[in-house]
Image (tube, rainbow, N blue to C red):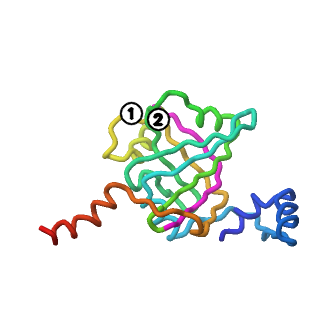
């Protein structure tokens, strides 16, 4: 567990709730520097084909958006920076608008078959792809068609791996097919 994540989220009201329910509360370790992604986090992120990103509206409403693409579309550019190309979508631009007034985001990555999840806290900046064509080209997965409109760069503040309790294993169609193929060959 990374220190900055807990320091950021275990607020006095959280500690009060912990005390009320469990009779004690966590005192998060103090740190002045952001958590840095290591090899485990980099491999997990680069193997993911989707994640959820939360932002907050100017009125304080949380908003969660699913992002998906080929494995590795969310790229780790450094131990403190992740980024992805944002293609034209439904034209609502809710995350983009929210980030314009509050750059704080949370990313939630799931690996259902292995019952693992990774949470990232960060500060996002959005680059217009027309003005940052090199970065947009670098981040655009070749398998995806369409026009990159923006690039999201997220400076990592903290991260945490969460326990597998209550994660129901689920499998993608390609994961199921990879398990079925040897059985089908054996039957044939």
CB-based contact (under 8 Å), mark 2 and mark 1: yes
- Frontmost residue, 125 versus 178: 178
User: Residue at the location (60% across, 43% down)?
Assistant: 64
Q: Is residue 124 magenta?
A: yes
Q: How many marks?
A: 2
Of residue 110 and residue 34, the one placed in the foreground of this image is: 110
**Main secondary structure of the magenta stretch:** strand
- Tell me if residue 45 is in the magenta stretch: no
Task: Please tell me whether mark 1 sits on a helix, a strand or a loop.
Answer: loop
SS at mark 2?
Answer: loop
Which marked residue is nearer to the observer: mark 2 or mark 1? 1
Q: Residue at x 28, y 60 (%)?
A: 177
Q: Percent from the top left, x then y, of residue 44?
A: 48, 64
- Snapshot quadrant of residue 29: bottom right
The crowd level at tag 2 (other Cα within 10 Å; few <14, some 14-19, many 20+) is many
Reply above or below: 120 against 69: below
Residue segment shown in magenta: 115-130
Q: Residues within 10 Å of mark 1 (few under 14, many from 20)?
A: some
Quadrant including the C terminus:
bottom left
Q: Is residue 168 above or below residue 136?
A: below
Residue 174: percent from left, percent from top: 31, 57
- Residue ID for mark 1: 147
């Amino acid at each position: 567990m990374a220190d900055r994540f807990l320091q950021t989220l275990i607020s006095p009201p959280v500690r009060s709730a912990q005390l009320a329910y469990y009779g004690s509360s966590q005192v998060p370790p103090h740190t002045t520097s952001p958590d840095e992604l290591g090899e485990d986090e980099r491999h997990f992120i680069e193997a993911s084909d989707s994640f959820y990103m939360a932002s907050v509206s100017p009125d304080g409403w949380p908003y969660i958006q699913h992002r998906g693409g080929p494995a590795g579309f969310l790229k780790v550019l450094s131990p403190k920076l992740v980024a992805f190309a944002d293609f034209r979508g439904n034209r609502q631009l809710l995350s983009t608008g929210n980030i314009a007034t509050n750059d704080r985001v949370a990313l939630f990555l799931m690996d259902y078959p292995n019952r693992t999840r990774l949470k990232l806290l960060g500060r996002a900046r959005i680059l217009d792809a027309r003005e940052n064509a090199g970065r947009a080209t670098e981040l655009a997965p070749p398998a995806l068609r369409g026009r990159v409109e923006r690039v999201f760069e997220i400076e990592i503040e903290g991260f945490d791996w969460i326990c597998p309790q209550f994660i129901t294993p689920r499998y993608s169609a390609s994961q199921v097919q990879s398990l079925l193929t040897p059985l089908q060959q054996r039957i044939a």
